[in-house]
Image: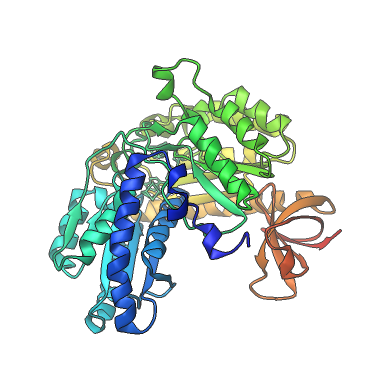
Amino acid sequence: MVNSEKNKINILNSCREEITDEESIRQLDYIDKARSIVSKYEKELGRKPRACVVTFGCQMNARDSEKLLAALKLVGYEETDSEDAEFVIYNTCTVRDNADQRVLGRLGQCSNFKKKNPLMKIAICGCMMQEPGAVEKIKKSYRFVDLIFGTHNIYKFAELLYTTLCSDKMIIDIWEKTDKIVEDLPVVRKYAYKSGVNIMFGCDKFCTYCIVPYVRGRERSRNPKDIIRECEKLAADGVKEIMLLGQNVNSYANDLRKVDKDAMSFAQLLDEVAKVEGIERVRFMTPHPRDFKDDVIDVIANNPKIARHIHLPLQSGSSKILKRMNRSYTKEEFLTLAAKIRERIPDVAITTDIIVGFPGETAADVDDTIDVVNKVKFDNAFTFIYSKRAGTPAAKFEDQVPEKEVKENFDRLLKVVQETAKEQAAKLLGRCEDVLVEGVNEHDSSLMTGRMSNNTLVHFPGGEELIGSFVKVKLTECHGFYYFGEKI
Ligand code: SAH
Ligand code: SF4
Ligand code: F3S
């Protein structure tokens, strides 16, 4: 029963009395109202109407999409992966220009389905909608869109959905900011055995290239009691692995501390979440190197339940560029931190994000980045070409780097990143590791695929009954980014 659809909807009408947040109850009332409209669609169609949630961007967007899907399912839609559906919603990302272009391409194609389906409604939400230019573009060139809303009011999706179902006009509801956190919204988890848990929203770091602080607003931390309560509920529902989510998880509670100087720190929170009965593995994403203090390293080192994987975004290895990026650490400070992490947490995998082509970046700056890659030996690195985001300070910097130069530097860096990642890959060969089984191997159905504490995938012979459980696997062969193994 644990994996059933019903149980994956955390909050049902039958347990309203458990809900403490008034706004959340208000939204459940809209779900009831919308349900009566959707049941009429069901009669008309002779089947359940279908809803498709298309997600772009980071883990935070993925978690938001689980809330969108819950509302859609509660009002009576059936989930589908196809955009040939009665309700399609795009949850957008705007961190780089190509993310914007991808969503607009998909949206354009979706209008063809709408021409054939009079019941179809199309919605678009998320980070891109917090940019006034993007909303204007949709209003002007994508007239067929029925609903536009942003990141700050996603909690009122049920209400917006109801309004849209009652109207023929384009509904637009964008808030510039918010200080609100609404608890207890229904969620339909994508995976039965693992879940993200937001610990904070927004970002105050204002790296000069980054749009996130503008589209996600100021840092707002959730109350630790609410976080632990959510983790306990998830554990009771069969979840074994939790990923604590925030743009800067180690800035957690900086805002709460202004009113309560003893507010729980990120290190303490990590420890508390790991204590929740039934939770066997805890991950977090993303920490900022600047705030990565010893207390966090100690908690991880002392607690085997906390994953041996730290995603530590470098962005650049040049202190000059880091300063212009407003990252508040130098090349040397990053190297010291990475060395300390590797020393205190044996077997840890360190992964990173790197941007190439930030304004003013020279080949010598990229040499510095390559030097850091060679020294830290990242287990994996996501390399991005700098994308100019309107409204960020770096967009106004005059020394933008010519495309050809960026491409050359990018290729040079990528080569080293791949070499060092490969070197790191085989380091656990022959060992027995705890693996959380995620599913059947995509290419060979006699194999199962699972994830180790350090986030590496391993494929091994086994049956579907293992999905969602931890097994011990001996790592017998390494193939670059994944292993083959045997269950023991
Ligand atoms: N809060 C996290 C991640 C934010 S976005 C952090 O501080 O690292 C994820 C990644 O996108 C970033 O780490 C960065 O490498 C990349 N990114 C952000 N803005 C970008 C831009 N304008 N151009 C290219 N890459 C960008
Ligand atoms: Fe963007 Fe920097 Fe905030 Fe990360 S820390 S979200 S890169 S502004
Ligand atoms: Fe993208 Fe928004 Fe995440 S811009 S990276 S979806 S916070």
Query: Which image quadrant for residue 266?
Result: top right
Q: Is residue 236 above or below residue 81?
A: above
Q: Quadrant of the image for the N terminus?
A: bottom right
Q: Residue at (36%, 45%) from the top-left corner?
A: 24
**Residue 93 falls in which quadrant of the image?**
bottom left
Q: Residue at x 38, y 39 (%)?
A: 21
Rendered location of residue 216, percent (x, y): 33, 42
Relative placement, left or right, of 430 versus 419 is right
Counting from the top left corner in percent of width and height, residue 390 is at 24, 46
How many labels sit on residues? 0
| Observer able to see residue 55 | no
- Point 83% across, 51% down: residue: 431
Image quarter (top left, top right, bottom left or bottom right) of the C terminus? bottom right
- Whether residue 192 can be seen here: yes
Query: Where does the image place residue 140, in percent across and percent down from the top left?
Result: 13, 63
Q: Residue at x 69, y 34 (%)?
A: 342
Front residue of 446/160: it is 160
Q: Is residue 25 above or below residue 115?
A: above
Relative horizontal placement of residue 251, taking residue 89 as reference (left or right): right
Please state the quadrant of the image where ligand 1 appears. Answer: top left
Q: Does residue 308 sit above or below 251 in this rendering?
A: below
Image-based side of 110 in relation to 62, left or right:
left
- Say which quarter of the image contains residue 404: bottom left
Frontmost residue, 297 versus 90? 90
Instruction: Check the image and tell me how it is coloured.
Output: rainbow
User: Percent position (x, y) of residue 413?
Assistant: 52, 49
Q: Nearer the viewer, residue 407 or 188?
A: 188
